[in-house]
Amino acid sequence: MSRIATTTDAADSNGYTALHFAVRSDFIKGSSETYLRRLQVSILLMRYGARWELEDDHGVTAAQIAWERILKNEHEAQGFREVFPESQTLPLFDFSDVHKTVLALLPVEIEAVLLKRKWRAQVDLRDAWGRTPLHWAILREDEKATRALITSGASIDIGDNEGNMPLHFAAGCPTLGCLNILLDSDAKPRIKNANGAEPLHFASWQTITHVKVLIQAGALATALDNRGSSVLEWACWCNKHVLGEYLVKMGADKNHADRLNGNPPLFSALTSQAYEFLEMLLSHDVNVLHINNTGSTVLHWTARCADIRMLRIIKSRKSQFKKVNISAKDKLGRTAKEVLEATGCTEEFSSEFVQFLNELHFCQRAEPRQIKRNTTFQKATRYFFSRTHSGLTVLAAFTAGALLYTLPFHYSAMLIVGILTWATADTLNVHYGKRRRRT
């Protein structure tokens, strides 16, 4: 490893060290192969001096993150026990005896523990993460412990340090057992965490059944978090296209843009490689003319992502993109083609994207110009002039009438003769001009 960068360097945005990133693997979308790579990277970093006790901006160490995954009972994460010793890490969690029982750190059944008044008084104690034993029972998908805790008086309305209620965690679990238990216990389906996310946001990463259960309990498909991200956008991040289609049918706005970047689900689908979700959105006639907060169009975003499969999905629906301005510039003054040139994409993508731009340009040039609708005033004026052959003649007649009262008789007579001559010549000119045009 080069000494230019060290294993203890922290990211500016969140204070994560390289070891934090190594253990924060997403096991929901990951695989055993992903886990092995993460484990090997963690071992390598520790060998080169990475310090597991360094905290991020939220006061959380890499060891705590790894042990959180272990304690959730994730099968693949158990290998982290070898990297992060239990004796050094677990005291950092500040677990109560009831916590330890739920987490199987004590060889006692939870029902037996809760029979004792001393331990029953601990059911709502919070650990270093702000989580109660009920939070952990749900994270482990332990329905037996969840029922026992609620029966013993555990609160379902206590949030952890990030404001996550037990229902948030239950909505994000693959199984429905704990979710149904909480809803049967009158948990609030529209409760928000510190980031403004509702349980339905978490459910959008799971199955359509999770979403249906929460909506039937009172959750809204139009819910937004503090960033203005919709449930539909959360579903898009995980390419849950079937679930997304159900949300649209339930009233979710397919064109809603978040407040932070001004990105609608269409843009999120491009960045998330959500191919099926993109096809679903296009089949529902999503707005392809949207411009986000950086001034980028869907063409800018497509060029930026440089994904050939995404491009071909868009090309297959070329008729929907005919009105997208190919010359539009973002706030940096770049067109989609200029964004493409700065991307460093493959030759195949570059060639197909430029060809697509040319096809759109040809379609836009071939499109007949639309005739603007006439206003009422324009119609009235045209009708009036068509009956008098010339607007100038009428105006002159009005002027002459006004002058008759002020000019001597001989001047008035000369003016009238002049106007009659002019009107006659004008009428003949209009008549023969029309005749010539007909022939």
Image (spheres, grey):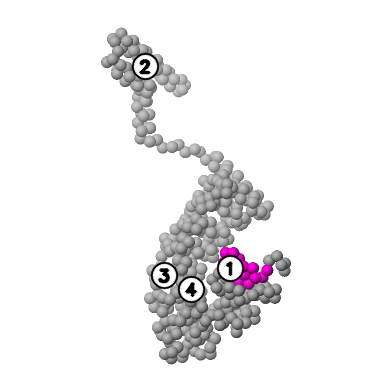
Reply above or below: 315 against 233. above
The residue at 44%/20% (across/down) is 433
Which one is earlier in the sequence, the residue at label 4 or at label 1? 1
Q: Amino acid at mark 2?
A: Ala
Q: Secondary structure at mark 4?
A: loop
Give neighbour class at mark 4: few <14, some 14-19, many 20+ (Cα, 10 Å).
Answer: some
Gap in angstroms between the C-alphas marked 2 and 4: 89 Å
Reply above or below: 233 against 356. below
Magenta stretch secondary structure, dominant: loop
Q: Secondary structure at mark 1?
A: loop
Q: Amino acid at mark 4?
A: Asn
Gap in angstroms between the C-alphas marked 3 and 1: 29 Å
Q: Which residue is mark 1?
A: 15
The nearer-to-camera label among 4 and 1 is: 1
Q: Are the residues tagged 4 and 3 within 8 Å (C-beta)? A: no
Gap in angstroms between the C-alphas marked 1 and 2: 88 Å
Give neighbour class at mark 3: few <14, some 14-19, many 20+ (Cα, 10 Å).
Answer: some
The residue at 54%/86% (across/down) is 105
Quarter of the view holding residue 58: bottom right
Which one is earlier in the sequence, the residue at label 4 or at label 3? 4
Q: Which residues are magenta?
A: 6-25
On-image quarter of the N terminus: bottom right
